[in-house]
């Protein structure tokens, strides 16, 4: 990846239980589980197409809005992308 992975954010699905959690712990990788609201924002309020291809396209669009456009209170009203870019800039200085 070009950098050390120190943490992973997951949605709390069953695929992130047991073996995955153990593997992360063994490697010193912290897991951050998203609250249920993250999923609700997309699946409950989006007008989704009926095809899997259409849903995937809508999800990619929503992820871009979530990560690059919408500010998050928990990040000091920055977007996740802006928060990460600020973190990188602070690391470099």
Image: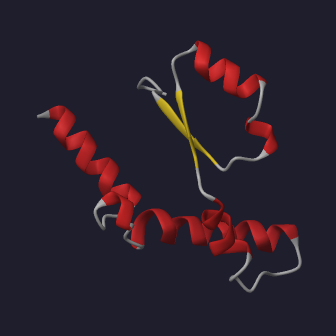
- Which quadrant of the figure has residue 6? top left
Q: Where's residue 72, x and y in %? A: 39, 67
Residue 3 visible in image = yes
Q: What is the number of callouts on the image?
A: 0
At 76% from the left and 33% from the top, the residue drawn is 17
Left or right of residue 80: residue 17: right
Which one is in front, 79 or 40?
Answer: 40
Which residue appears farthest toward the top when viewing the image?
26
- Which quadrant of the figure has residue 89? top left
Which residue appears farthest toward the bottom when viewing the image?
47
Q: How is the image coloured?
A: secondary structure
Which quadrant: the C terminus?
A: top left
Q: Where's residue 57, x and y in %? A: 70, 70
Q: 54 above or below 79?
A: below
Q: Where's residue 28, x and y in %? A: 51, 18
Q: 3 above or below 93?
A: above
At 77% from the left and 23% from the top, the residue drawn is 19
Q: 82 above or below 86?
A: below
Q: Where's residue 73, x and y in %? A: 36, 67
Left or right of residue 59: residue 87: left
Q: 56 above or below 29?
A: below
At 57% from the left and 65% from the top, the residue drawn is 63
């Amino acid at each position: 990846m070009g950098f050390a992975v120190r943490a992973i954010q997951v949605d709390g699905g069953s695929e992130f239980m047991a073996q995955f959690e153990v593997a992360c712990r063994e490697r010193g990788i912290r897991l951050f589980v998203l609250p249920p609201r993250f999923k609700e924002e997309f699946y409950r309020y989006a007008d989704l197409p009926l095809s899997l291809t259409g849903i995937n396209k809508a999800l990619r669009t929503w992820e871009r809005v979530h990560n690059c456009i919408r500010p998050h209170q928990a990040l000091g009203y920055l977007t996740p992308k802006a928060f990460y870019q600020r973190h990188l800039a602070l690391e470099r200085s």
